[in-house]
Image (cartoon, rainbow, N blue to C red):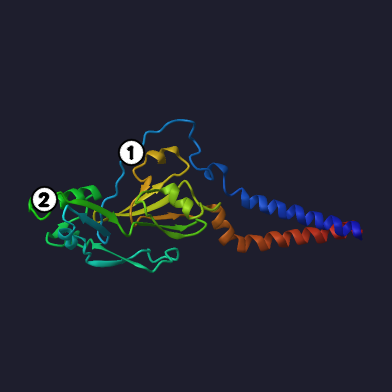
Amino acid sequence: MYLRTESSLKLLVVGLMIVSFLFASCSTPQHTLYLQNIRDTTITVNGNFEPLIQKNDVLQITVSSLNPEDAVIYNASNTVAPTGGGGASSGNTASLGGFLVDQQGLIQYPVLGPVKAEGLTKKGLTDYIRDQLVQRKLLVDPVVSVRFLNYRVTLLGEVTRPTVVNVTNEKISILEAIGMAGDITIYGKKENVLLIRDQEGQRVIKRLNLNDKNILNSPYYYLQSNDVVYVEPNKAKQFSGEKSRVVLPIVFSGLSLMVIILDRLILN
């Protein structure tokens, strides 16, 4: 009787190992590695990446001059923006003052009035404001600084921690963002990552292959403010989440039947 039970247990364990193998085989190794076709090399990348200002951005604009009292009025913000993106990761409900880029792409700047900001880089807006202050003889040798207050990207889908990442240095690559979300899970499609970007009044949708080294030269390697990155589930996840509810009961029923049959044969 003991030998019979031990044989039955061994059969059941072997069956479970086979089922586990079938699940694991749904995710092929070539789809689990980043930059799998890269070798030791040097890749020239665009180091001058600078994001464009978009509608609904909140900008911090700081002005100083030889006479600090004259510059005070130009540092008065006209709105308040939350530091987080409304996601679970923001955590910080504090507010920062800034200049909101409205639906016409304008900011309402003290003395200068409406200023077109949408589509400009920080440098472009900095140069414009400084030139206007000088040309109108409002300040002497002004120093202008522009920063984003709401630079953030969102990561969803098959990442360890779906989150909203607040980017303090205003520059982040897609690999860095995924790393901050705890990496893509074993069920995520690295070869077909979806990027959603609002750009010049249009919604751009791009699929990126993180298995391929060419992502390092892609214009989408660096993320812009308000980008959304979505990692789709692979076939292994779909199988385990949907078909397993049908397949597993059948498999285990078959294993149980085999154990009963072997028991009867051994008993006889």
Quarter location, residue 87: bottom left
The secondary structure type at the circle numbered 1 is: loop
Three-letter amino acid code of the residue under disc 2: Val
State which quarter of the image contains the N terminus.
Answer: bottom right
Q: Amino acid at mark 1?
A: Asn
The residue indicated by pointer 1 is: 46
| Mark-to-mark CA distance, 1 and 2 | 32 Å
The residue that appears at 45% across and 66% down in the rendered structure is 88
Marker disc for residue 78: none
Nearer the observer, 92 or 12 = 92
x 15%, y 57%: residue: 115
Q: Residues within 10 Å of mark 1 (few under 14, many from 20)?
A: few
| Mark 2: few/some/many CA within 10 Å (<14, 14-19, 20+) | few
Helix, strand or loop at mark 2:
helix
Seen from the viewer's position, the closer of residues 209 and 62 is 62
Q: Residue 159: x percent and y percent?
A: 50, 56
- The spot of residue 235 in percent (x, y) is 54, 53
User: Residue 65: x percent and y percent?
Assistant: 18, 53
Residue 187, given in percent of the width and then of the height, sits at 54, 53
Label 2 sits on residue: 134
**Relative to 33, 11 lies left or right:** right
Among numbered discs 1 and 2, the one appearing first in the sequence: 1
